Image (tube, grey):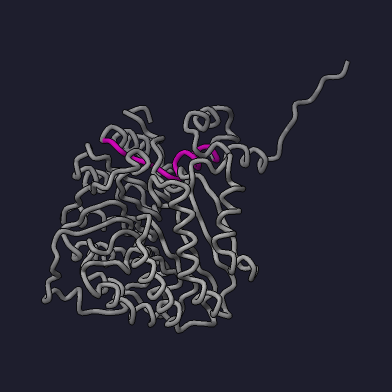
Amino acid sequence: MTVDRPIIFPQEIIDNFIDGCYDDTYTLRQCALTCRAWLPRSRHNLYYRIVLRRHEQLLSLSWSLSSSSELPELVLELVVEMPLETPATFVNEVCAVLARQIPRVRKLTVAQPRFVYPDARETVQISTSTAACISTFASVTHLALMDLLLDSLVDLIRIVKALPSLSVLQCKAIEWEEPETPADDPLFDEEGWLSLDTLAMAGSWDDVPDIDILFRAVDPQRLKHLSIDSSAVFSDYGLVFDDVFPVIHSFTALESLTIVHIYLPYTPEQIGNMQDTVSSVLGGIVSPGSFQRVKIDFTQVVSRSRQDVVETAKNVSSALDEALLSNPHLEEAVVEVAVADSAQFGDWWKTEFEGAFSSLHQRGILRVSVRDPSEFYMMEKTSFEDGQG
């Protein structure tokens, strides 16, 4: 009598299977308990990216990390979500408890979860003391701040100044209360000290006066990727964006420019302003040899009809055509959109955007990416829920 031998899968196949469950905490826990060979990859997916929203989760995570010398090394991304009912001091707690427990964390996100409040425009206030606490994560290379209200630009500058390894700064819908920047603060006398590869500023520029100070702090020979909000050109602060123009034109290593759209639809006057601005930005880029890519980002657009999005795409196309088509070094133009019906109507959206950007499509450099909104907003699912780590 022959006995069937059990099928032994290569470890690579097992790891790929476990990776496919990366966003399913319950299944990953079961995988971790299956056998010794499944434990390392399961732990990697459970601890690679941690999302915290409440005090109970923080205590559960801290206890879990202290139970093993291996677990703290696995945490590379930390997301601190701030629902409107969560006290702002929660960020202080997280920093005080975890700054020394997770020495290898690379990406830190502090945000209001707009996936939960998709139409909310409120911001969570971050005090000067909280800004100081954020800067205790010295290993962070990627800092993302979303839907936050700071006391002043000084706090933002001090945060990035205190993160020696920072290379990516991503700000979306942030603002600060103090309209005036202290003229005697030595932080604002220096230029070119901030060694960023990527700088992203999405959201209304009316709420970020003196933002050109941050741009001037960036090393112009280092920055490769720049992302700006299309509404920056509509600023009521008068000449806010004009102050940034010469700084952008000094970025000699720039490889890509992203135009982010959040507020739709635009008026005809705003479309005209965008055309002039984008043409000036692209026309003034002094790194034609390295500049290769433009991205039009509709993934942050909140609660707009199909007609609004498609019509805006056509208007944006008319604003960009002249500047993009005249750039012989441009190798790729990406249009990215996040829509709830991407699974059912992804092909329809792709066809509409290819039609809206027909000139770029005919040139053969257009790529349209239709994705699900959940890929871009904070998710409700967490790894450490109410003490059940």
Q: Which is more toward the observer, 171 or 297?
A: 297
Name the quadrant of the N terminus. top right
Q: Residue 161 placed where, x, y %?
A: 26, 67
- Residue name at image x 62 percent, y 41 percent: 16
Q: Quadrant of the C terminus?
A: top left
Query: Residue 5: horizontal and vertical position, in percent?
Result: 79, 25
Residue 333 x, y percent position in the rendering: 55, 66
Furthest-top residue in this view: 1
Residue 264 vertical position relative to residue 55 in the rendered view, above or below:
below
Tell me, yes or no, whether the highlighted magenta stretch contains residue 207. no
Q: Quadrant of residue 382?
A: top left
Q: Residue furthest right?
A: 1
In the image, taking residue 369 as reference, residue 274 lies left or right, namely: left
> Which region shows up in magenta?
41-54
Residue drawn at (50%, 33%) of the image = 24
**Residue at figure coordinates x 45%, y 72% from the top left:** 224
How many numbered tags mark residues here? 0
Note whether 107 is above or below 375 in the view shown. below
Q: Against 70, is 336 above or below?
A: below
Give the percent coordinates (x, y) of residue 379: 40, 40
Q: In terms of image quadrants, where is residue 198?
A: bottom left
* Residue drawn at 21 percent across, 56 percent down: 131
Q: Nearer the viewer, residue 66 or 86?
A: 86
